[in-house]
Amino acid sequence: MRDYHVYHFCLREYIQFLLEAVVLILLVCYLFYHSLFAVVLILPFYPIFLKIKAKRLLEQEKQQLCSQFKETISSVAAALNAGYSVENAWREAKTEMAQLYGEQALMVQELQHILAHLSMNVPLEDLLYDFARRSDMEDVSSFCQVFFFAKRSGGDFIGIIRATTERIGQKIELQDQLAADLASRRLESRIMNVVPFVILLYLNVTSPGYFDILYGNISGICIMSVCLIVYLAAYAMSEQMLRQSLRI
């Protein structure tokens, strides 16, 4: 099964992001340097561009997986309450998740993996711990620990699982609400990131020669390079602030 620490691009994504990078690089070269020779200097940053894309896609995948995991453990708790055995409760959860999200959903694939290995007598606890390790999600690790303890210690197993499910579900719902509240801030950040390019493009189109003093000479290249570095630093800072807000 896949490791959620690393994102693997498919061919379509490689082509898509390559085209995006080419357009972005050409735009930067034109607006900041008025020279295509700058492509040689900027092109090596393409791997960094891919790394940023991979990180963003991984975050999206983990958000989807976290939401689907909440529904899964809710389904497991309901099945246990209805009298299913532990293993059959996970089979029932897989059926419900496939109906809800489709067979290609991340959590459905994980449940298929778990059920396939359960049929080979692999302990459920080992499979859940493996999923927690690969997903690197705190909620999954917490559930695995409680699930293992409740199953081994006996007692009100269903009550313990239900209480844990409700707690994790409330936490995930809070995170989803926070992400929705921050959506407007993220949109504002995207707009602010585009504004400098729009201003430069507008001045270059409407006032030809306005920035000529900054092109084709060492001092101008240095000034525009500093401006580009400051812009990239501001972009990185805004992204970091948004990520920190989501973790609160």
Image: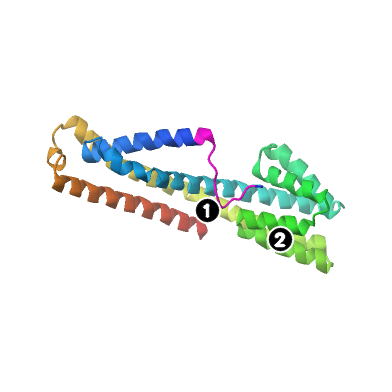
Q: Secondary structure at mark 1?
A: helix
Decide which of tag 2 and tag 1 comes sooner along the chain: 2
Location of residue 146 in the rendering, given as x and y in whole percent from the top left corner: 73, 64
Location of residue 175 in the rendering, given as x and y in whole percent from the top left corner: 56, 54
Q: CA gap, disc 2 to disc 1?
A: 25 Å
Q: Secondary structure at mark 2?
A: helix
Give the vertical position of 6 relative to 133 (above or below).
above
The answer to whether residue 188 shows anywhere in this view is: no
Q: Which residue is mark 1?
A: 178
Magenta stretch?
2-13
Residue drawn at 33 percent across, 53 percent down: 233
Tell me the quarter of the picture where residue 37 sits: top left
The answer to whether residue 30 shows anywhere in this view is: yes
Of residues 134 and 62, the one drawn nearer to the viewer in this rendering: 134
Residue drawn at 22 percent across, 40 percent down: 33
Q: Is residue 150 left or right of residue 60?
A: right
